[in-house]
Amino acid sequence: MIPIRDENPTHSTPIITYLLIALNIIVFAFQTMLGSSNEQFIYQFALIPAEVTTLSIDGIFNIFTSMFMHAGFAHLGGNMLYLWIFGDNVEDRLGSGRYLFFYILGGTVASIAHIMSSPGSQIPTVGASGAIAAVLGAYLVLFPKQKVLTLIPLGFWLRMTMLPASIVLGGWFLFQLFQVMLSLGDPSIGGVAFWAHIGGFISGVLLGLLFKKPESEYPSNYW
């Protein structure tokens, strides 16, 4: 299932979501301009679990820098699509200040989950998907009944339909769990950080409920 858009209007301009999308695009454009030097750039600023578990200062710092790096156009495009669709409403519900803190904290928890799943890994990991997984978790608990226009591939056929966010995001989470189960015991795992997705999503569920603004701050017709 691929979400296209939701039917959930916001009551404020999602400045932080826009800035996060812009920053991710700018960093990726910079990576592209590096050409053959991009690999060195990735190893310098990507998350490498073994560097964090040995308490390397650079390794710990890279937990944050890796959130704004991507491995290719498809990687960037997929992540930004999910952030565009779901981030604005989560920001609207949490408030921009809380949302920025929530996003970074969710991404950090996701990174820790990935590190714990493979503490000695030397494989560099990049991407905003851990933080965005937190956004998805928060959206699930804050707006479970909101409708999402979803593209569903059925073999050679494609179907567009409206589905509740609980189905779209719950299905996404179950897919991550399935991938984790497949990867158990596979030493080659590391390119796709499924444990980061799981950790980020669960943290988003909890933090979304914790950080949301009081309902009294919303218009009476918000729901």
Image: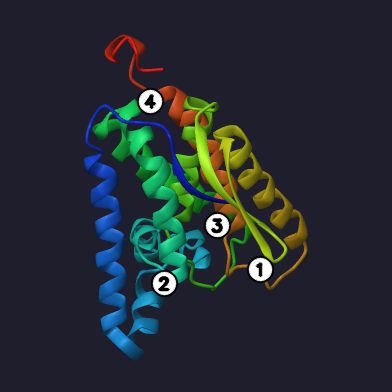
The amino acid pointed to by label 4 is Phe
Label placed on residue 73: 2
Marks 4, 2: nearer the viewer: 2
Q: Mark 1 or mark 4, which is nearer the start of the sequence? A: 1
Q: CA distance from mark 4 to mark 2?
A: 32 Å
Mark number, residue 115: 3
For the residues bearing labels 3 and 2, Cβ distance under 8 angstroms? no
Mark 3 or mark 2, which has the lower sequence index? 2
Return the residue nearer the eye: 61 or 77: 77
Query: Looking at the rendered structure, which numbered label has been put on residue 189?
Result: 1
Q: Residue at x 31, y 9 (%)?
A: 216
Question: How busy is the neighbourhood of tag 3: few (under 14 within 10 Å), some, or many (20 plus)?
Answer: many
Residue 39: percent from left, percent from top: 40, 83
Q: Mark 2 or mark 4, which is nearer the start of the sequence?
A: 2
Q: Earlier in the sequence, mark 1 or mark 2?
A: 2
Apparent side of residue 175 relative to residue 198 in the rendered image (left or right):
right
Q: Is residue 186 left or right of residue 22?
A: right
Question: Is disc 1 placed on a helix, strand or loop?
Answer: loop
Q: CA–CA distance between discs 4 and 1? A: 33 Å
- The residues tagged by marks 1 and 3 sit, at their Cα atoms, a distance apart of 12 Å
Nearer to us of marks 4 and 3 is: 4
